[in-house]
Image (cartoon, grey):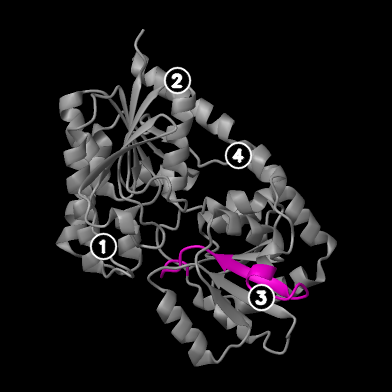
Amino acid sequence: MATERVLIYSQAFFPDHSGIPIYSSDFAFYCSENGYDVDVITGFPFYPQWEKRKEDKGKLFAKETVKGISIYRGYLYVAKNPTSFQRILHELTLVLFALLNSFRVKRPDIIVVFTTPVLLGVIAAFMNLFWKRKLVINVQDFQVEAAYSLGMLKGSTVLHIINKIEIWSYKQAHHVSSISNSMTQLLIDRKKIDHTKVILWPNWLHVKESKSDFPEKGLFRQKFGISQDSFLVAYAGNIGKKQGLEILVDIATKFSVRPDLLFLIIGEGSGLESLKAYAAKLGVENVLFLPFLNAQEYKEYLVDVDAIFISQMKIPFDVYFPSKLLGIMSVGQLLIISADQNSELYKVMKKNNLALVADYDDTDTLKEHIDTAIGNCSKVKEYKTESVKFIDQYDRELVLSNFLKSLKNLSQN
């Protein structure tokens, strides 16, 4: 029997190591490890810095092989701190060259698309009109709903059209998956996708490695000139409108008389400069901005800070559960969450006793939580213990082996 061929579409891929490419890359590697031939259609590395490597600038196409996987890269327009128009141009170039690369790969047996952008799923659905193979669209984010929620192109004809063709692509797929129960329910309720086609495919991590592969403490603080005695409350990740990190700056002002307490905001994104301007306007001196961390620095960061802050501003369709939380919980870090009490994030963390949780904008409760964290009481230790136990259900082998079984059932049917 011939080896089955899996084709993966993803906006970004290895060596990019933040957000969706973490999962699209690892899924490709897992398929290869389990005997599948794997092709990947993607762009040139750029994320999350929104900047291409020097060696990739000006290239239209490239093919490379990594761990037995054939990667077909196509040109995509990338602008630092992109405007709405530049993001549209970015996606259009990505999709155009993904379409062209679709004619360069061998006919697949199974197609798996990691979205966003939704147009990537549309391209795969279009190509599958000719391939007539099994198609799975994995929805990592709801692009149209996010745009509505953040007031981007609100009420525009463009969003209406994108929503229509997004739903069309889902209806062409054999399965549409997403990463949380609330997100799969949105597919059924809002997108009107047949519930028999919708499956839960959560993101995952290497549980055993993440629980044991700890770097030496103190390296992160030493590298960035931070006192070993400072109590660190830190955020690391994308800095955009959705994160609502102004709330962390507001909290910092309440601790201005505590020289032993430092707030870190680490990362890059379209909202970085405005957030820095906001901090400057308030005159805060206990907030330190640091650049995006590489993979090793991020591990060092996880073991060196004292509490990790996660924030999601109140928006409609708040069904997202940030997958980076899994890695944070695996090291037994204390989480302080600021999110809408009706959001998936708030409900999961509160229900399972995993974090100190406050409704977004409730600065008084957040201040109490930070005081609790500094006190390091028995309740803090309980949160850390529960977090480490919680992630076992998201182990890489467990999640991906179950998903491969569903792929095999698809191909056999």
CB-based contact (under 8 Å), mark 4 and mark 2 = no
Among numbered discs 3 and 1, the one appearing first in the sequence: 1
The residue under label 1 is: 87
Q: Residue at x 66, y 75 (%)?
A: 225
The residue under label 3 is: 225
Q: Position of residue 251 (x, y in %)?
A: 61, 80
Among numbered discs 2 and 1, the one appearing first in the sequence: 2
Does residue 162 appear to the left or right of 49 in the view shown?
left
| Distance of label 3 from label 1 (alpha carbons) | 36 Å
| Distance of label 3 from label 2 (alpha carbons) | 47 Å
Q: Nearer the viewer, residue 409 or 278?
A: 278
| Distance of label 2 from label 1 (alpha carbons) | 37 Å
The residue under label 4 is: 206
Q: Can you say whether 277 is above or below 61 in the image?
A: below
At mark 4, the secondary structure is: loop
Q: Residue at x 73, y 49 (%)?
A: 386
Q: Nearer the viewer, residue 331 or 74?
A: 74
Q: Nearer the viewer, residue 52 or 410?
A: 52
* Mark 1 Cα shell of 10 Å, populated few (<14), some (14-19), many (≥20): some
The residue under label 2 is: 35
Amino acid residing under circle 4: His
Does residue 362 appear to the left or right of 281 in the view shown?
right
* Mark 3 Cα shell of 10 Å, populated few (<14), some (14-19), many (≥20): few
Q: Magenta segment: does it hold 231?
A: yes
Q: Residue at x 50, y 78 (%)?
A: 246
**Which residues make up the magenta segment?**
222-243
Q: Is residue 257 visible?
A: yes
Amino acid residing under circle 1: Arg
Q: Kindly indicate the quadrant of the structure image that contains residue 295.
A: bottom right
| Quadrant where the N terminus is found in the figure | top left
